[in-house]
């Protein structure tokens, strides 16, 4: 069977976990947490990083840091995971869903400005499949309207936006960014995430929220002589056991990325003719984005064609899966949405199909299956 995803282990995970356990420090913010945070701060120039128990948690921290309140409006794509929206809905915000681009599930940057009102507080972008949104345009809109930008970079580790400032790591451009280390992402810790803070005004308060609303971090750094309750907060930090696992992955980041890119390029090259003759589109990476090979997908001609391909692959024990169901049409939000039809979002909801992509995948098996469909059709 070829599953859709298979978590890759570098081999050192249990070694570092054992080290963490034996050290006697297994709660959060210990040696491995600091190693991981420092890795990200140095490699991608994020101002400050805090590991969290999920990307969902990091997004919730972002919503608290931005002081999102009842009736504030937050603009984001509809074609995304529920957590992107939930983090802001939890604070009482109204979500204003923007359509995707015609050529990519990312938010259509040309449609953001028309959605801004005097209630708008933030724009949340999602780098779908790890591919960069058009950040120069988005940051410019935010600046002119005095809005914050949050990057949902759950899928975007080790990827870059190429714009007027040259090549910038995704997650380093918005005021705040959220990453995921869920087992379906490129770099994993089972469940796990990280908040990256680029606007320095949020650094101190982020640490307080992270430590249950106390100034415990400042106390351990010797900045205050006792710690107590100073703000709202929650327990957002993961244990050292999770951070130790993540460290084993980070040590192998380049190796993991290279392997995923090899698979991605192999799919792209070998499926090109097949896709063309079946009116199927392969993933598009705009010139302003590099590719971190988080996901390989097809845009089918129709929903029926997608169902047929899923069925045929399943019969051969290959698991391909569709993705998000537009949030503006979800059971929870459809009566809160303002009724706009989001054409491109609908297209990706109905027609996008994700192929298996993981470190140990044998892409040839999947590719050959597609090519056999072709010869079956010709006969
Ligand atoms: C995976 C994902 C999340 C959620 O990540 P968790 O770590 O599971 O909370 C949020 N947004 C996007 C775009 C994702 O792909």
Image (spheres, helix red, strand yellow):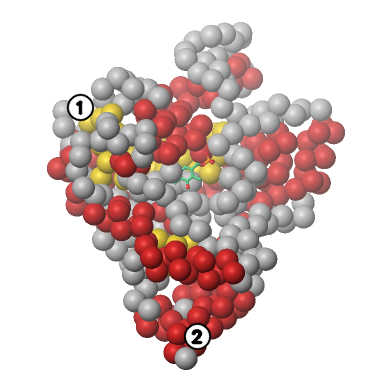
Q: Residue at x 39, y 48 (%)?
A: 325
Depth check: give the residue in front, 376 or 318: 376
Q: In the image, residue 138 lies at what x, y percent?
A: 26, 47
Quadrant the N terminus occupies: bottom right
Q: Residues within 10 Å of mark 1 (few under 14, many from 20)?
A: few
Q: CA distance from mark 2 to mark 1?
A: 56 Å
Specify the label residue 86 is tagged with: none
Q: In the image, residue 265 lies at what x, y percent?
A: 50, 74
Q: In the image, residue 214 lies at what x, y percent?
A: 55, 14
Depth check: give the residue in front, 205 or 319: 319
Q: Residue at x 44, y 64 (%)?
A: 307
Confirm whether residue 357 shows in the render.
no
Please state if 368 lies on the left or on the right of 350 as rendered: right
| Position above or below: 297 against 116 | below
Depth check: give the residue in front, 257 or 190: 190
Please state if 279 lies on the left or on the right of 379 as rendered: left
The residue wearing badge 2 is: 376
Q: Residues within 10 Å of mark 2 (few under 14, many from 20)?
A: few
Helix or strand or loop: what does disc 1 sit on? loop
Of badges 2 and 1, the one in the foreground is: 2
The residue wearing badge 1 is: 119
Q: In the image, residue 316 lies at what x, y percent?
A: 61, 71
Q: Residue at x 40, y 69 (%)?
A: 305
């Amino acid at each position: 069977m070829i599953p859709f995803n298979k978590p890759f282990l570098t081999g050192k995970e249990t070694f570092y976990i054992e080290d963490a356990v034996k050290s006697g420090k297994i709660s959060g913010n210990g040696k491995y947490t600091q190693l991981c945070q420092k890795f990200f701060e140095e490699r991608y120039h994020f101002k400050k990083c805090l590991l969290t128990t999920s990307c969902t948690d990091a997004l919730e921290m972002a919503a608290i840091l931005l002081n999102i309140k009842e009736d504030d409006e937050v603009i984001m794509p509809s074609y995304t995971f529920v957590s992107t929206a939930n983090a802001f809905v939890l604070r009482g915000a109204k979500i204003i869903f923007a359509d995707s681009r015609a050529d990519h599930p990312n938010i259509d940057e040309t449609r953001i400005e028309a959605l801004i009102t005097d209630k708008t507080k933030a724009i949340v972008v999602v780098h779908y499949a790890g591919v960069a949104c058009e950040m120069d345009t988005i940051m410019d809109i935010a600046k002119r309207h005095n809005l914050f930008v949050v990057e949902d970079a759950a899928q975007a580790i080790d990827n870059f936006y190429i714009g007027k400032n040259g090549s910038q790591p995704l997650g380093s451009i918005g005021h705040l960014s959220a990453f995921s280390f869920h087992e379906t992402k490129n770099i994993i810790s089972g469940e796990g995430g990280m908040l990256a803070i680029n606007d320095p005004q949020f650094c101190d308060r982020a640490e307080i929220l992270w430590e249950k609303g106390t100034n415990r971090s400042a106390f351990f750094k010797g900045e205050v002589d006792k710690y107590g309750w100073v703000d709202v907060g929650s327990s957002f930090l993961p244990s050292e056991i999770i951070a130790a696992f993540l460290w084993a992955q980070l040590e192998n980041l380049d190796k993991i990325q290279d392997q995923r890119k090899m698979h991605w390029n192999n799919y792209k090259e070998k499926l090109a003719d097949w896709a063309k003759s079946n009116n199927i589109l392969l993933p598009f990476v705009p010139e302003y984005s590099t590719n971190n090979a988080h996901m390989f997908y097809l845009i089918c001609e129709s929903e029926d064609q997608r169902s047929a391909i899923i069925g045929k692959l399943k019969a051969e024990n290959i698991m391909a899966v569709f993705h998000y169901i537009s949030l503006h049409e979800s059971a929870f939000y459809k009566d809160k949405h303002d009724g706009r039809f989001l054409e491109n979002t609908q297209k990706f909801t109905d027609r996008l199909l994700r192929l298996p992509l993981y470190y140990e995948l044998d892409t040839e098996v999947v590719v050959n299956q597609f090519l056999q469909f072709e010869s079956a059709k010709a006969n």
